[in-house]
Image: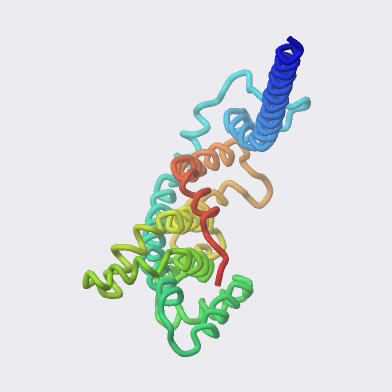
Amino acid sequence: MKTDARALSIQRQLRRSAARRRYARLVGHALVYALMIFLALIFMLPIFWMASTSLKLPREIFAWPPEWIPSTPQWGNFAEAFGKYPLARYMLNSAILVIANIIGGLISVPIIAYGFARFEFPFKNALFLLMLSTMMVPGHIKLIPMFWLYSRLELIDTYWPLILPAYFGNPFFVFLMTQYIRTIPRDLDDAARIDGAGAWGILYRIIIPLSRPALTVVVVFTFVWVWNDFLEPIIFLRDWDSYPISVGLAFFQGRYSVEWHLFMGATLVSIIPILVVYFFAQKHLIGGLASIGIKG
């Protein structure tokens, strides 16, 4: 009888301890989710304020106390913004630049990274370090020699200065892709060679299909960087009709005033493509960044 009572007591203690662990785990998860929701709301405040400002009258923008929700939403601000400047044309120009740069990155980056990751050639490590060292050079320093070079080639006021660099490989993307390819077992390459595949066949049939997470990083980062690029388009382009949306938004900022309601409306529309791309690519993007190794 004492043995049975002791066993029942032990079972009760085990059940109570398991219940306490479940309760502690539930409370911990609830606190984590509450903190994440709170931080998400804080990070969303600028976008919410942008949307609110885009629906206000000019006199309501700087009213005190501020009105988060306008009493009478001015939906016509969006039509006025797109009617005042050819923003649709500017967004189309940005899309053309983005597509051209993404194609260039998807062609050049895997080829260069494949060479660094899989082949042995003289001065390989020195060239790799030289490539990495270019990432330490501020981009502003390169603008003057690049402008001189493109002016000699008579490419100023064309899209070529904004597209050609992508077809020679971005050092950051080459580094990420090289490190990712190094994590792919070489046994797959050997098996493909036994089946008669050459270097190009291994690249396009094995390496690239297995490198989709890293290529997703290339696509998303290229999209964001090119879409938001302001300095290079305003230096290399002179025709107003060829400007991308990043430069077109600056037209709302005058010398003495800023049309904030139109500016915020146009900016809100311009960030929608970035939000859409991130929404559909976030799973692959986070997985790609997490799976890129750092072995060398």
- Identify which residue is drawn at 55% across, 72% down: 296
Residue 34 spot, x, y in % from top left: 69, 28
Q: Would residue 149 be seen by someone viewing this image from the given angle?
A: yes
Q: Residue furthest bottom?
A: 122
Viewport quadrant of the N terminus? top right
Residue 71 drawn above or below residue 189: above
Residue 165 spot, x, y in % from top left: 45, 71
- Identify which residue is drawn at 42% across, 58% down: 215
Residue 204 spot, x, y in % from top left: 30, 65
Q: Is residue 177 left or right of residue 256?
A: left
The part of the image, by quadrant, that contains residue 154 is bottom left
Q: Residue furthest top?
A: 1
Q: Nearer the viewer, residue 191 or 216?
A: 191
Residue 4 spot, x, y in % from top left: 71, 13
- Identify which residue is drawn at 62% across, 29% down: 52
Q: Would residue 243 be seen by someone viewing this image from the given angle?
A: no
Q: Residue furthest front?
A: 1
The part of the image, by quadrant, that contains residue 194 is bottom left
- Identify which residue is drawn at 51% across, 77% down: 146
Q: Nearer the viewer, residue 145 or 288?
A: 288
Q: Is residue 186 left or right of residue 62?
A: left
What is the image's colouring? rainbow
Residue 75 drawn above or below residue 289: above
Q: Residue furthest left?
A: 196
Q: Is residue 47 left or right of residue 201?
A: right
